Amino acid sequence: MDRRDTLKTLLIGSVATGALLKSGCKTSEIEKSTSTTKLYGRTPEEAKVDKKLKEAPSEFTSEELATIAILCDIILPSTAFAGSATDAEVPAFIDFIVKDIPTHLLPLKGGLMWLNHQSLIRFNKSFKDLDSTQQINIIDDIAYPDNASAEMLPGVRFFNKMRDLTLTGYYTSKMGIEDLGYQGNRANAWDGVPEEVLKEHDVDYDAEWLAKCVDQSQRFEIAKWDENGRLLT
């Protein structure tokens, strides 16, 4: 299993997979609902805050943003099946999050400074100007906390934060959701109490009720009852 599959497996365990029953809607109503105007998903007040944050100047320099982009793609590179973290605009997400949650700024700025300091010591260049082999030479020393030396701990903490933000940004993007294969809520299908449970309690279904209550072709129909409380459909 490669790094991306490992990260995906860890993340997908936290995704809700419960099904949503749609028995209260007719098929025609469901189809109609998919063609309604797409909503933003925020209250007007939240939308104003988001707009203000997006329009605010970045807290990072162009060199820092370039380094963040490199780190994002080291953490989640592209594959034959999915794009990279930068393809999903994760650096822009991190830039936004820092403006929204300023407590991220100092650890990230400090971590980028630490990373460049290591680059200068080892290769006399800033991190973004190193070749990929040199970059991985440094990353390997901070990407595995259990194996890191004491002097690498500041870098470990920084890379942990970068990894968390990169995964969050990627797997909350459209590209990341598609990479997970998450399809969202789907209408459930109930075919009655399991046969072994019915036998255990020595009961069974009345054929007429079974036809009315466990008919998958009518799963989107609204049940109708007569004035005496008898099920009609």
Image (cartoon, helix red, strand yellow):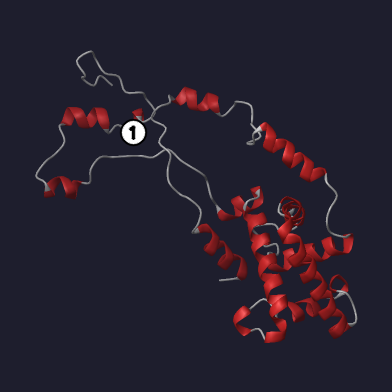
Marks counted in the figure total 1
Q: Residue at x 61, y 66 (%)?
A: 4
Q: Amino acid at mark 1?
A: Gln
Q: Which residue is mark 1?
A: 216
Helix, strand or loop under label 1 = helix
**Nearest the eye: 124 or 46:** 46
Q: Position of residue 84 (x, y in %)?
A: 71, 59
Q: Is residue 198 above or below residue 105?
A: above
Q: Quadrant of the C terminus?
A: top left
Q: Quadrant of the N terminus?
A: bottom right
Q: Residue at x 80, y 66 (%)?
A: 109
**Nearest the eye: 224 or 125:** 125
Q: Is residue 125 above or below residue 218?
A: below
Q: Residue at x 78, y 62 (%)?
A: 69
Q: Taking 175 as reference, is 223 left or right?
A: left
Q: Is residue 179 above or below residue 31?
A: below
Q: Taking 181 as reference, is 64 left or right?
A: right
**Nearest the eye: 185 or 158:** 158
Q: Position of residue 151 (x, y in %)?
A: 72, 85
Q: Taking 29 as reference, is 141 left or right?
A: right
Q: Taking 64 as reference, is 219 left or right?
A: left
Q: Quadrant of residue 68?
A: bottom right
Residue most extreme to the top: 227
Residue most extreme to the left: 202
